Amino acid sequence: KSRYNRHEIRKIPDGILFGTATASYQVEGAWDEDGKSENIWDRLTHSKPCPVKNCDTGDIADDSYHQYERDVEMMRELGLDFYRFSLSWSRILPTSFPDKINKKGVQYYNNLIDEMLKYNIQPMVTLYHWDLPQKLQDMGGWTNPHVVDWFTDYARIVFELFGDRVKYWFTINEPREVCYEGYGGANFAPAYNLSGYGDYMCAKNLLVAHAKAYHMYKNEFSRTQGGTVGIAASASWFEPKSEKDAEAAEDARQFEWGLYTNPIFSKNGDFPQVVKDRVAAKSFEQGFFRSRLPEFTPEEVELVKGSSDFLGINHYTSKITYRNASITTFPSPSFYDDIEALYDYDFTWETAASSWLKVVPWGFYKLLTKLRTDYDNPPIYITENGFSTRGGLEDDSRIAYYRQYIDAMLDAIDEGSDVRAYTAWSLMDNFEWRQGYTERFGLYEVDYEDPKRTRTARKSAYVYKEIIRSRQLDYHYEPDTTLPITI
Ligand code: PNW
């Protein structure tokens, strides 16, 4: 549906930064080296029967703990403006608390940051991308309100250690995945499976933790360090199946990401009204004495409101949404019973190696348009966008995905969306959570048979490099992949 004519070359506006992303557990390896302690993904992947495809783990992953120089070399080959990576809490603070700082763990991040800065590649750093110290999980993790203090103390250490050089911070990657997939469902660690309770408790604590860390930075570090702080939320597009499903689709958007973005970016703050009303009404019907969705106090509403300099968005795909009261698929109470919506895919949509990942570029355009209108055009960083294959260097389907999604993003920018950065997920193949190494998102292929974890540029790496170099989108550009990709 893009109005763009693909036979023309499309110019990318000046000033938009281009980068790639990874996350600590997915690439670092060295899971118990140099004083790092156990986190919830170590615990999950080591449990029996193994919950991950092929019993894969992140024990070694891409071995980035030892290969950061090669990683930075790849960033230079691509000509990136920035690289987004995350810090491992239990590597920096092995007790989870600030009483003991692990020098060797800190050295690794210093080395990585300094190596990047040597070549003018800006570090964009995520404090938390899903690898909570196991000890904190033993005390309830994100469902324990004390996590607010645990996280703020960790954030203080990190700002003190790296804030002289890091100017872009993300507190938490994808609240929805942390809270729903980890506590509501059982897909991700810690796999609590407490849908309709655990997810909502997590949501409240996580938002307050984020906001406290944000204000601490603003009050105590901003003046000397001058950086910018935000959050990265996952947001799929939910398209109504027919006209009468408009409300179902809007409900899905508010439960799936509004739950996390509304308290920060809306004019009035707080959880979305529809979520508060629905969960409260259902809870009382179900015999609860209070809503399963915890309330923010008025002070907390104010604390969380506006607690981000920009909105980070991880976007991959879209879903068709509808309502059909006669279909009861979800246990009650549960998060999906609360939403009262059903999801589907259009059979014409192309699918990636990940079954959930359908190629719907216009959904990206619609999402950006809605964020612009609902939240008064906040600065947006696209913090992740990408496509999976089963491997192989000739990845034309990934190239087509990137071109169409960047194209859709440019459509939204032309209409006024304030997009400041675009991030390809991922720099290289990595541990794809429950799918292990079976689904590959990398611009670079990683050889997991090879102890050296050799990285090789895919065709998409050449194309992404050319987009960044030329600052234009040309659907007809064909790289010569017989030539090595060079700096
Ligand atoms: C991201 N969705 O999560 C994660 O941040 C990465 O760690 C992960 O490797 C990557 O996706 C690929 O799976 C997602 O709703 C969260 O469509 C939500 C969605 C997709 C990916």
Image (cartoon, rainbow, N blue to C red):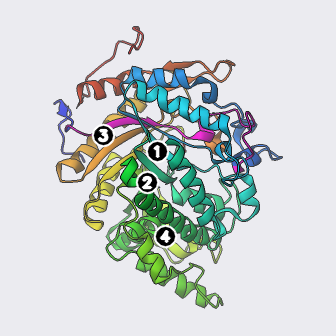
Pick the front one: 450 or 207:
207
Kind of residue at disc 2: Phe
Q: Nearer the viewer, mark 2 or mark 4?
A: 2
Relative height, residue 250 to residue 221 (above, below): below
Mark 1 C-beta closer than 8 Å to ligand 1: no
Query: 10 Å neighbourhood of mark 3: few (<14), some, or many (≥20)?
Result: some
Q: Nearer the viewer, mark 4 or mark 3?
A: 3
Pick the front one: 160 or 285:
160
Closer to the N terminus: mark 3 or mark 1?
A: 1
Residue 18 is a magenta residue: yes
Mark 2 C-beta closer than 8 Å to ligand 1: no
Closer to the N terminus: mark 3 or mark 2?
A: 2
Element class at badge 2: helix
**What residue lies at 67% left-to-right and 42% top-to-bottom?**
91
Asked whether disc 2 touches disc 1, contact meaning CB atoms under 8 Å apart, the reply is yes
**Residue 215: x and y, percent?**
44, 63
- Residues under labels 1 and 4: Cα distance? 43 Å
**Label annotation for residue 406:** 3
Would residue 187 appear left or right of 428 to someone viewing this image? right
**What residue lies at 74% left-to-right and 33% top-to-bottom?**
33
Q: Which residue is mark 4?
A: 341
Q: Which residue is mark 1?
A: 163
Kind of residue at disc 3: Ile
- Residues under labels 3 and 2: Cα distance? 34 Å
Q: Which residue is mark 2?
A: 221
Give the residues drawn in magenta, as a range. Answer: 14-40
Kind of residue at disc 1: Gly
Asked whether disc 3 touches disc 1, contact meaning CB atoms under 8 Å apart, the reply is no
Kind of residue at disc 4: Ala
